[in-house]
C-alpha cells in the first residue's frame, strides 16, 4: 500500500493522530494539500530547519525545491527512497499521496524523512482517542515502511558500547562477513540491523533475517536457497529463498551456532563459491547478499569439539564483534531504565538504594531482562517510590526461573542482599560453564581476580565446572 486514505476534514484537523505521528515518528515530515500548500510541519522538522514553521500556508516550493510533491499528487503515486541533503546531512525521503475515500481524489501528500522506533508508533495508537475509521490506513502504511534499527537504538555511553559502535560502523563500511557474538538479550539484532542501515543509508536495499533455530532442519535448506516446482512433496510451485530475497542487500543468519553440520557444509560451499542453486534446480544463482551472522555460543570452542565447522567459523568471522553483557556496563543501567520508561510514557520513581541494587545485579538475561523488569515496575508500582525491597521481590520472580535453568534450586532469602548473592552465584556458574572450568578465564570475564574467584566458588559450594557440589 502506497497511499494514505483520509477525508479533507481529517487532513485539515489541527489535532489529529496523523499530526501526532508526524511529530513523534519521523525526523522530518511535511503535510501539504492538493495545491501543494503547506498545512503542517512536524516539531522534529524545526531541529533540522528552524524556520520551517514560518512556511505554513505557503507553497511547498518555498521550503523544498527538490522533492516531487507535485508529481506525487498528479500521479497519485508514492516516491520512496529519495536521496536528499539537509544542512550537509544525506538522508532518505519518502512522499505518499493522500486520497479522500469518499470522492476518491487526491487531496494532499505527506513527505517524510527517516523512520524512528516503531514501538513509539504503537504507543501513540494505543493512547489515541481516534476511532479505527479515523485512523484508516495510516498505521498499516507506516508499519510497512518502517526502517531497521540504527546505532542510536543501541542505548549506552559505556566505553565498551562506544567501542562496539565504532567497530560496527567500520564493519558496515566493508562488504566482509560480520559475526556478532553475545549472550541472549544483549542486543545482537539491533547491531545487525544498524550495520545494514549504515551500509545502505543512501539506497534502498533488502534486509532479510532468518532464525536458524526456528526452522526445522529439513526445511532450512529450502528456506535459504529456495526450491523448484516438484522438488519435493508439496512443492507445487517454484519458490525463491532468503538468499535471493536479500540480493543486493544483507541477510542475517541469527543463532547460527544451532545450525546442523550438514547445513553448515552447504552454507560453506555457498560462501566460498559465491553462488547457489535452488533445491531441485540446476540454475546457478549468484550470491549478492552481504552476510551477517549472530550467535550466543562460543563457536571457537564448538569448532574444537567438532560441533561447528572450523572452516565455516573462520569464513564467517572476517569481522567479529562482541556485544558486552549488561553486567559489564552497569553505568548504562540508569539510562536504559529511562529509555524503557520513555517508551511506555511513564517514569517510575526508583529510590537510590533501589538503583544501587539494579546496578549490582548480574543480569543473566541482560538488557532484555532489564526491560521486562522496568515494565513490571512501571505497572505495579505506579504512583509511589520503588524501594530496593520492591526490586528484590520482582527480581526474585525471575531468579527462580534462572535457578531452574542453570541447575540449582537454593531458595532465595527475603533480603535484597540475597538476590545479589544468588545472581552472583548464577553469573559464576555461567562463566565457569562458558570457559569449561577454566578459573582464570572465568574470573577475567567477570572482572575479578583469580583469588576472588576461588573464594566465591568456595563460598557458594560450587565445583570448578560450575556445578553444585
Image (cartoon, grey):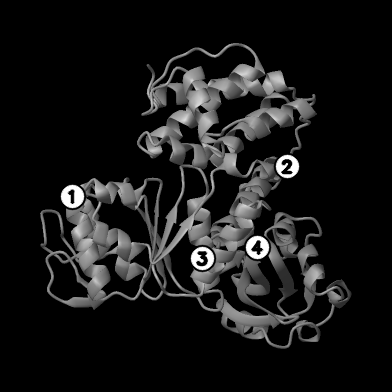
| Residue 431 percent coordinates (x, y) | 45, 35
5, 427: nearer the viewer: 427
Residue at screen point 52% across, 24% down: 456
Q: Which residue is mark 4?
A: 6
Q: Would you call the spot at circle 1 few (<14 residues within 10 Å), some (14-19), or many (20 or more)?
A: few
| Residue 420 percent coordinates (x, y) | 60, 24
Task: Tell me if residue 165 comes above or below residue 394 in the rendering.
Answer: below
Q: CA–CA distance between discs 2 and 1?
A: 44 Å
Q: Nearer the viewer, mark 4 or mark 1?
A: 1
Q: CA–CA distance between discs 3 and 4?
A: 36 Å
Residue at screen point 20% across, 66% down: 238
Q: Nearer the viewer, mark 2 or mark 4?
A: 2
Nearest to N terminus: mark 3 or mark 4: 4
Q: Which residue is mark 1?
A: 218
Q: Which residue is mark 2?
A: 345
Residues at discs 4 and 1 in contact (Cβ within 8 Å):
no
Nearest to N terminus: mark 3 or mark 2: 3
Nearest to N terminus: mark 3 or mark 1: 3
Q: Would you call the spot at circle 2 few (<14 residues within 10 Å), some (14-19), or many (20 or more)?
A: few
In terms of image quadrants, where is residue 118? bottom right
Task: Tell me if residue 294 comes above or below residue 413 in the rendering.
Answer: below
Q: CA–CA distance between discs 4 and 1?
A: 47 Å
Q: Nearer the viewer, mark 3 or mark 4?
A: 3
Residues at discs 3 and 4 in contact (Cβ within 8 Å):
no
227, 384: nearer the viewer: 384
Q: Quadrant of the C terminus?
A: top left
Q: Can you see residue 133?
A: no
Q: Which residue is mark 3?
A: 195
Q: Would you call the spot at circle 3 few (<14 residues within 10 Å), some (14-19), or many (20 or more)?
A: many
Q: Secondary structure at mark 2?
A: loop
| Residue 264 percent coordinates (x, y) | 23, 57
Amino acid at each position: 500500500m502506497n497511499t494514505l486514505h483520509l477525508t479533507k476534514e481529517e487532513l485539515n484537523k489541527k489535532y489529529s493522530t496523523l499530526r501526532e505521528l508526524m511529530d513523534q515518528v519521523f525526523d522530518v515530515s511535511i503535510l501539504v494539500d492538493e495545491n501543494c500548500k503547506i498545512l503542517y510541519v512536524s516539531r522534529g522538522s524545526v531541529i533540522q530547519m528552524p524556520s520551517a514553521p514560518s512556511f505554513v500556508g505557503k507553497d511547498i516550493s518555498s521550503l523544498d525545491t527538490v522533492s516531487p510533491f507535485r508529481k506525487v499528487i498528479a500521479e497519485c503515486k508514492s516516491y520512496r527512497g529519495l536521496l536528499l541533503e539537509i544542512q550537509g546531512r544525506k538522508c532518505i525521503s519518502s512522499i505518499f499521496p493522500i486520497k479522500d475515500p469518499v470522492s476518491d481524489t487526491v487531496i494532499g501528500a505527506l513527505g517524510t524523512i527517516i523512520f524512528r522506533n516503531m514501538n513509539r508508533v504503537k504507543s501513540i495508537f494505543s493512547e489515541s482517542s481516534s476511532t479505527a475509521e479515523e485512523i484508516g490506513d495510516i498505521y498499516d502504511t507506516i508499519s510497512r515502511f518502517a526502517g531497521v534499527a540504527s546505532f542510536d537504538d543501541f542505548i549506552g555511553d559505556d566505553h565498551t558500547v562506544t567501542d562496539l559502535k565504532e567497530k560496527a560502523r567500520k564493519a558496515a563500511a566493508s562488504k566482509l562477513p560480520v559475526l556478532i557474538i553475545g549472550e541472549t538479550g544483549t542486543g545482537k539484532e539491533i547491531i545487525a540491523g544498524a550495520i545494514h542501515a549504515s551500509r545502505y543509508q543512501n539506497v534502498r536495499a533488502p534486509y532479510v533475517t532468518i532464525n536458524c533455530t526456528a526452522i526445522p532442519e529439513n526445511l532450512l535448506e529450502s528456506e535459504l536457497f529456495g526450491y523448484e516446482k516438484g522438488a519435493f512433496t508439496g512443492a507445487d510451485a517454484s519458490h525463491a529463498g532468503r538468499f535471493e530475497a536479500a540480493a543486493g542487500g544483507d541477510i542475517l543468519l541469527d543463532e547460527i551456532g544451532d545450525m546442523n553440520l550438514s547445513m553448515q557444509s552447504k552454507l560453506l560451499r555457498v560462501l566460498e563459491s559465491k553462488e547457489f542453486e535452488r533445491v531441485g534446480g540446476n540454475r546457478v544463482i549468484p550470491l549478492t547478499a552481504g552476510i551477517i551472522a549472530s550467535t550466543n555460543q562460543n563457536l571457537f570452542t564448538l569448532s574444537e569439539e567438532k560441533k561447528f565447522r572450523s572452516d565455516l567459523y573462520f569464513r564467517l568471522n572476517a569481522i567479529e564483534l562482541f556485544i558486552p553483557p549488561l553486567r559489564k556496563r552497569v553505568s548504562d543501567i540508569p539510562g536504559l531504565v529511562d529509555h524503557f520508561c520513555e517508551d511506555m510514557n511513564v517514569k517510575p520513581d526508583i529510590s537510590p538504594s533501589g538503583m544501587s541494587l539494579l546496578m549490582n545485579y548480574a543480569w543473566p538475561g541482560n538488557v532484555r531482562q532489564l526491560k521486562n523488569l522496568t515494565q513490571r515496575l512501571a505497572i505495579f508500582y505506579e504512583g509511589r517510590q520503588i524501594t530496593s525491597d520492591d526490586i528484590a521481590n520482582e527480581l526474585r520472580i525471575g531468579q527462580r526461573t534462572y535457578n531452574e535453568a542453570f541447575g540449582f534450586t537454593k531458595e532465595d532469602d527475603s533480603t535484597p542482599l540475597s538476590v545479589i548473592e544468588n545472581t552472583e552465584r548464577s553469573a559464576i556458574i555461567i562463566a565457569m560453564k562458558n570457559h569449561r572450568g577454566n578459573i582464570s578465564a572465568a574470573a577475567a570475564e567477570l572482572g575479578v581476580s583469580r583469588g576472588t574467584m576461588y573464594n566465591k566458588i568456595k563460598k557458594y559450594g560450587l565445583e570448578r565446572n560450575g556445578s553444585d557440589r
